[in-house]
Image (spheres, rainbow, N blue to C red):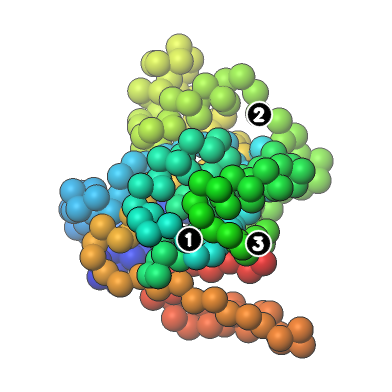
Amino acid sequence: MDKTDVILCQLLLMNSRLSYRRLADMLNLSVAAVHNRIQSLIDAGVIRKFTAKISLAALKAVHVILFGTSKYGLVRDLNVKMANHGSIYWLAIGGGNMLYIGAYLKSIDELGSLVNYVKEAAGVIEPTVGIPYFPFPKPVVAGSCNMTLYDLDYKIIRALKDNSRRAISEVADELGVSAKTVRRRLSRMIRLGLIELSIEWYPDASNDIITIFHIHLKPEADKNAIDGIFKKYTPHIMFYWGF
């Protein structure tokens, strides 16, 4: 992937329904060039699906990242074990059997059982557990806004879950409602941050070198300094978590 591919993927991670025209304007490319780049990323296995799901804000879920070294000699078969745990959504394997595991919990009370599962199934004897905060801007929502997801909202999310770029008219026909209704309900969910429109992204399929740095800040350190580092080196720094 070149620099433009990385930025394109980041834009789709944040909103996988962005139109080719909008993406082209943001990247200063032609619509055809954007289409070709996305298709090449799909063919290479870097982008495997355009997804839609209920957001963490709507679920009121707790996001947890666990990392540590596995005692097992072979860790390549851990994907199935991790997928069997209903809360784990992400597994990354680094050098020296270093594992990074992401999970969503209904409440912090489930943390103990998750840690025990990772210890047993992944062989991480002493996992480090972090509850991240997200540095990226979130939708601005007035306190009086109704954050409820209704039956039709769930149906729309379900219709988009494996292809978030489906046409509004196609979703409307499937659900037996008007395109105007689907567009209005979807716009509301996006505005309130109730839906997550993203991609299944596998940058390692590109054979590029991807590195995770662990930065331990001193108590007196300015945590906002990380924002400056992120902005300076974007898009080479693709994302970060603060715990």
Viewed as shown, does residue 206 lie left or right of 71?
left
Residue 176 visible within the image? yes
Residue on which disc 2 sits: 149
Q: Nearer the viewer, residue 128 or 138?
A: 128
Residue 70's disc is: 1
Please, is residue 102 above or below residue 175 in the view? below
Q: Counting other residues with Cα less than 10 Å from the Cα at mark 3, is it few (<14), some (14-19), or many (20 or more)?
A: some
**Does the image show residue 134?**
no
Label 2, residues with CA under 10 Å away: few <14, some 14-19, many ≥20: some
Q: Nearer the viewer, mark 1 or mark 3?
A: 1
Residue at 55% in and 62% down: 67
Q: Secondary structure at mark 1?
A: loop
| Label 1: how many Cα within 10 Å (few below 14, some 14–19, many 20+) | many
Which residue shows up at 75% across the image and 34% down it? 146
Mark closer to the observer (2, 1)? 1
* Residue 197 placement (x, y as % from top left): 47, 43
